[in-house]
């Protein structure tokens, strides 16, 4: 169902920018709102005949603990990247998307805003949820969806959770 095509690595050897050669790119942080945005984006991509790209940005503080973690041992960044990818793939699988839809999962090391905006350089559409896992810091600095709307190199759709729009026809 998913394949990994990531390019541009940072100093730690993990992916910084994903290769999204067209189609619909949707940001996914593991929240319920992101799951709704994923389902909305998948319906649109299927109807338009576009591939779907799902991206999760991560930092060491937000990554799940890799299987190689042990007390007194900090695993390499690549192990954290693999753990993030496994979580994202589980969320995509749980969405029960149309099996005929081409879906590619990407993970990028860094902030969500940077990962989404830089990875959207060749995307036809960027889809983000309006409410994710942010907290007080995002209120002060500006939300991911707001920054994507202002700075993305392609059109952006913001899917608001709880409005019914996420469940209505895309």
Image (spheres, grey):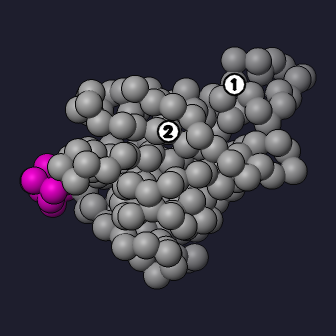
Q: Nearer the viewer, residue 161 or 39?
A: 39
> Pointer 1 and pointer 2: residues touching (CB < 8 Å)?
no
Task: Judge whether residue 142 can be spotted in this image.
Answer: yes
Nearer to us in this view, 63 or 151: 151
Query: Where is residue 157 shown, x and y percent of the image?
Result: 31, 67
Where residue 105 is drawn, which disc sits there? 2
Residue located 50% across and 39% down the image: 105
Where are the magenta residues, as a range?
Answer: 162-170
User: SS at mark 1?
Assistant: loop
**Residue under the point 57% across and 35% down:** 4
> Crowding near pointer 1: few (<14 within 10 Å), some, many (20+)?
some
Of residue 91 and residue 14, the one placed in the foreground of this image is 14
**Dominant secondary structure of the residues highlighted in magenta in the image:** loop
Q: Is residue 158 left or right of residue 77?
A: left
Rounded to the nearest angstrom, the CA distance separating label 1 from label 2 is 18 Å
**Circle 2 — which element?**
strand
Q: Quadrant of the N terminus?
A: top left
Quick one: label 1 or label 2, which is nearer the N terminus? 1
Q: Position of residue 133 (x, y in %)?
A: 47, 53
Please tell me whether residue 50 is drawn above or below residue 147 in the rendered image: above
Asked where in the image residue 140 lies, by quadrant, the reply is: bottom right
Decide whether residue 164 is among the magenta residues.
Answer: yes
Spot occupied by residue 73 in the image (x, y as percentages of width and height): 88, 23
Disc 1: which residue:
66
16 to 140, vertically: above or below: above
Q: Residue at x 50, y 55 (%)?
A: 21
């Amino acid at each position: 169902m998913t394949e990994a095509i990531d390019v541009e690595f940072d100093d730690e050897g993990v992916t910084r920018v994903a290769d999204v050669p067209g189609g619909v790119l949707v940001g996914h942080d593991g929240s319920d709102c992101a799951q709704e945005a994923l389902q909305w984006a998948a319906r649109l991509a299927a109807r338009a005949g576009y591939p779907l790209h799902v991206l999760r940005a991560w930092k060491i503080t937000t990554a799940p603990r890799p299987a190689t973690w042990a007390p007194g041992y900090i695993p390499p960044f690549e192990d954290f990247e693999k753990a993030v990818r496994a979580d994202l793939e589980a969320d995509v699988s749980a969405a029960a998307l149309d099996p005929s839809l081409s879906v590619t999962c990407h993970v990028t090391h860094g902030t969500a805003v940077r990962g989404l905006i830089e990875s959207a350089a060749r995307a036809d559409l960027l889809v983000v949820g309006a409410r994710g896992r942010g907290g007080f810091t995002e209120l002060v600095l500006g939300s991911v969806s707001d920054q994507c709307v202002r700075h993305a190199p392609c059109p952006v759709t913001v899917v608001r959770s709880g409005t019914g729009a996420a469940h209505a026809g895309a």
